[in-house]
Image (cartoon, rainbow, N blue to C red):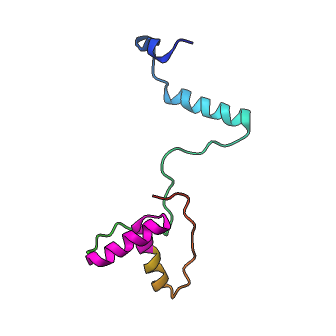
Amino acid sequence: MKKVKEFDFSKARRVTPRETTAYKKAIEATFHVKRPSRGRPPKGADKYRDVHIRLHPKALEWAHAQAKQRGIGYQTLINEVLMQRATGGHAPHRPLSHSK
C-alpha cells in the first residue's frame, strides 16, 4: 500500500452504516468477543452533579496542595473529604485509574 501522503483520497468513499454493522458482526463472530460500544459509558444512579460553589482562597490552596501531594485532582480531593464527612468516615475508597 502507498504511504498516506500518496493516497488519492478523491477515489475514496465513506463506509455506510450498514457496512459498519456488518463488519462489527463479522469481527464478533470471528473472534467470539463482543466489541465494546464507543463513547462515554452511560451514567448510573450515582452520577455526579455539576455544582458551582465559592470557596475561601485558603481552603482552595489547601485542596490544591493536598491533591498535588497525592497525585489526584483537587476536585476529587474535595469530593472525598465531603464524602467522608457525610458518611461519618465510612466512605468506600475507590482507587483512581489515572492521576492529573
Vertical position of residue 35 compared to residue 72: above or below: above
- Relative to the observer, which residue lies in front, 32 or 85? 85
Task: Farthest residue to the bottom: give it.
Answer: 88
Vertical position of residue 28 compared to residue 83: above or below: above
- Residue 23 in magenta stretch: no
Which corner quadrant holds the N terminus? Answer: top right
* Residue 85 image position (x, y, % from top left): 46, 85
Q: Residue at x 47, y 75 (%)?
A: 80
- Relative to the observer, which residue lies in front, 7 or 77? 77
- Relative to the observer, which residue lies in front, 100 or 69? 69
Residue 62 appears in which quarter of the rendering? bottom left
- Residue 57 in magenta stretch: yes
The magenta region covers: 56-79
Q: Is residue 54 visible?
A: yes
Q: Is residue 48 visible?
A: no
Q: Residue at x 53, y 11 (%)?
A: 2
Q: Residue at x 45, y 18 (%)?
A: 13
Chief secondary structure of the magenta span? helix
Residue 61 appears in which quarter of the rendering? bottom left
Vertical position of residue 15 compared to residue 32: above or below: above
Q: Is residue 41 left or right of residue 29?
A: left
Q: Is residue 62 left or right of residue 13?
A: left
* Residue 34 image position (x, y, % from top left): 66, 43
Residue 32 appears in which quarter of the rendering? top right
Q: Residue at x 49, y 68 (%)?
A: 70
* Residue 84 image position (x, y, % from top left): 49, 82
